[in-house]
Image (spheres, helix red, strand yellow):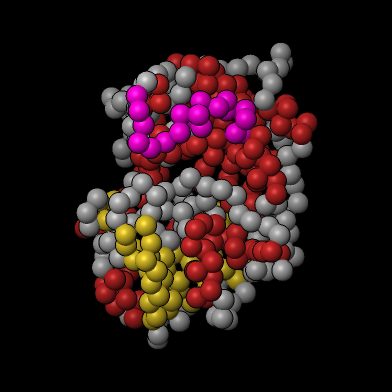
Amino acid sequence: MLQQFIRPPSTRFQGSKAKIIDWIWQNIQHLPFETVLDAMGGTGIFAFWAKLHGKNVTYNDVFKWCYYVGLAIIENGSVKLSDHDVNFILSKHDNITYDDFIQKTFRGIYYLDEENAWLDMVIANIREIGDRYKRAIALSALFQSCLIKRPYNLFHRANLYMRLADVKRSFGNKTTWDRPFSYYFRRFVKEYNACVFSNGRKCRALNLDVFDIPDEEEYDLVYIDPPYYSRRRGPTDYYLYYHFLEGLCIYLEQGPEAWARLIDYQRKPRPLKHGTELEQKIMPWLREHTIRKAFDKIFEKFQDSILVVSYNSEGIPSEEEIKQMLESYKNEVVVKRLRYQYVLSPLKVDELLFIAV
């Protein structure tokens, strides 16, 4: 079988199911389904696993940077970045005009000056790549390169000082942080190239709000892995955590002016402003008073499909509430649980898998 030889790419995405995907699949592989929607796909681990198992897969995510990952390894069935492509991306060219937007805007916030200059150069070079699947692989490798060089793998704090301080460290790896971007870019291109394959089925990637996925589409199974709203820590704010990666997509597609218009310059991390169209789409999952309605709305939307929901025992709504909502649309709801501890979290919680048929 394909999965014996191909593994998903490594990821530093908070909430990724990469380490428990085998457990998830073992609990659903007996179900009768051929067409799959990964409705809130993130870095595409579930969609990739479904593709490995020969399913007709649709990947979706509201974030543009996640969409590029889906484009690279889910929709793409044959295109890879060549060594020539990589060398082109990593070199400066006399016929390309390079902006200095990242250098000016994010100086001293996330990366060193020379690293910011490298990012400005690489975005301009990737923009010159005509094939959209090659471009998606390049961006996916760039995103992982950006994450691995960040404390906590996040962009919610302007904390370059943590990397530069000459202190004894209880976490992180200064050697990892200080390796050049080009080293990681080449490494992650190899990983993503190794994930490119065709399973003989139609697979595609979408970049939509989950509620805007066309109703006329039919899926045997819909997998839902929503942002968690923790009882103890509040919402998982992907809009803040990964704003820089979303900004890189805006920079590439629309230019520096478009990214500049969306930045909140009053906040130290220079995140995207509140009130953008993107934030409005994810806002229902970030507020305790709206998240229950969001869950019910998504269950109603896909009630004609088998529903599989990844969840967390610390989440709001509670396990009992999720089960009751599912039971209002489906005949049978089974809950599987796995004791699990997430990276950078001292809490051991139950990873929950709701299977509603």
Report the number of numbered marks: 0
Of 107 and 214, nearer the camera is 107
Image point 75% across, 65% down: which residue?
A: 200
Q: Is residue 66 magenta?
A: no
The answer, for residue 26, to whether it is visible in the render is yes
- Identify which residue, 258 or 1, lies in the foreground: 1
Q: Quadrant of residue 145?
A: top right
Magenta residue check for 182: yes
> Residue at coordinates 22% horizontally, 57% vertically from top-left?
231
Say if 340 sits above or below 14 in the image: below
Residue 113 drawn above or below residue 318: above
26 in relation to 40, above or below: below
Q: Residue at x 34, y 81 (%)?
A: 327
Is residue 300 visible in the rendered image? The answer is no
Single out the residue that lies furthest toward the top. 94
Residue 148, percent from left and from top:
50, 36
Given residues 25 and 175, the one toward you in this image is 175
Report the side of 266 relative to 222 (left or right). left
Point out the image quarter for the N terminus: bottom right
Quarter of the image where the C terminus is located: bottom left
Q: In the visual, does 245 lie left or right of 339?
A: right
Relative image position of residue 172 (x, y in whole percent):
42, 36
**Apparent side of residue 67 relative to residue 354 in the rendered image (left or right):** right
Question: Residue 239: x, y in percent?
Answer: 38, 43
Q: Residue furthest front?
A: 168
201 left or right of 263 in image: right
Name which quarter of the figure residue 312 lies in: bottom left
Q: Position of residue 45 (x, y in %)?
A: 54, 57
What segment is highlighted magenta in the picture?
167-185
Residue occupying the point 57% across, 21% down: 118
